[in-house]
Amino acid sequence: MSEGDNDSATDRLTTGLIHHRYQPPAGFGAVPPGVFKASTVIFKDTAALRARRWQDKTGYTYGLHGTPTTFTLEERIASLEGGRHTLLAPSGLAAIALVDLALLAAGDEVLLPANVYGPSRELARHELARLGVAHRLYDPLDATALADMIGPQTKLVWLEAAGSVTMEFPDLAGLVAACKARDVITALDNTWGAGIAFAPFDCGVDISMQALTKYASGGADVLMGSVTTRDDALHQRLKTTHMRLGLGVGANDAELVLRSLPSLVLRYTAQDAAARRLAAWWHGRSEVVQILHPAFEGAPGHAHWASACRAAAGLFSVVFDARYTQAQVDAFLDTLRLFKLGYSWAGPVSLVVPYDLTALRGTGAGAGQGMLVRFAIGLEAADDLIADCEQALPALTA
Ligand SMILES: *Cc1c(COP(=O)(O)O)cnc(C)c1O
């Protein structure tokens, strides 16, 4: 056999493996919607290539602009949120940045709740400021004060329900009404509600954003964000910026979230119930002076939560009595066995994070100056989690 024969044989093999004649039978049905991976999308002819617009979901253009997998996830999140259009971003924070960059220009102002997700404020303080966009913080419990703050340069108001760490539930109806009266776009960080605790668009918001990293994923193994709207024109504005920024998500990540969605309501409900049991247990303890859980009477914004919500996330904070030092609270946290130290929430493993209340405190909760610990309840048995806290308590006074 000559060398040339060998070359053409391997060529045929290589090309044959790439352009193989076999096509599996159509009509495969299974429970998972399947995973499609692509950068390149193949057009059947030049007419199809020229006719294709990336702006809609009637077909495919390029992996970044959508695949059956990402379209499927977008549609399911849109339904979950009660919206019409959803865009996916590589993280919750990227989804926040997308909204900011799509809607704000030099000279504009964005208003953030004082208890806003910290990195969203950092984005405003640094990146938005560099682009000439100003920001101010408002009290999420005072709609009248927000109405007074809105000026001609105010182009976007972020809402968060409940707020991060201190968990104040805002006067959503009042805040949205104040913005609507001045024609200002409202964007809700709906990570806590997850589409389950309340229907975001029924509250009148224009945009509902979620860190799918939390409840939609539920596995502590994927980062993703979503931006959902009802309004076609607003969606197109966001989608254009989304495309120009090149924000895409990986097919395997989209698959993970698609796999988790069927159990979303079950997980949310279970973590809600377990968190309320844990919070109730802490409520009876003399070591803590305040329970920051919006479903608890006396928690800031409780009345707003009660009027707006049918459920709560598995998340709450407790404020320790000021007599306990940081070192003592740290010793308690380090003695926990089931609870792990770490950020994020809504995964299977329960988590704790200590926060410095004085550094955090904007407005809202009228707690003292003690150490704050946030509890994110996982899927362990509530009794085991209570027992874990109980066995670690002596470390507080050791
Ligand atoms: C986690 C979180 C985010 C950001 O999500 P990432 O995917 O971690 O970037 C935004 N908002 C809230 C309220 C969150 O809890």
Image: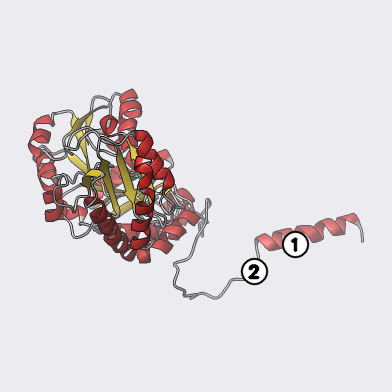
User: Counting residues from the N terminus, which is met first, the one under dot 2 or under dot 1?
Assistant: 1
Image point (82%, 56%), residue name: 7
Point out the image quarter for the N terminus: bottom right
Q: Which residue is mark 2?
A: 21
Residue most toward the right?
1
At mark 2, the secondary structure is: loop
Q: Quadrant of residue 380?
A: bottom left
Eyeballing the image, is 204 above or below 360? below
What residue sits right under mark 1 in the picture?
13
Question: Quick one: 265 or 204, which is closer to the camera?
Answer: 265
Q: Position of residue 21 (x, y in %)?
A: 64, 69
How packed mark 2 is, by other alpha carbons closer than 10 Å (few <14, some 14-19, many 20 or more), is few
Q: Contact, CB < 8 Å: mark 2 with mark 1?
A: no
Residue 83 image offset from top left, x and y in percent: 25, 56
* As drawn, 311 above or below 238: below
Name the amino acid type tagged 1.
Answer: Leu
Image coordinates of residue 98 in percent, x first then y, are 34, 40
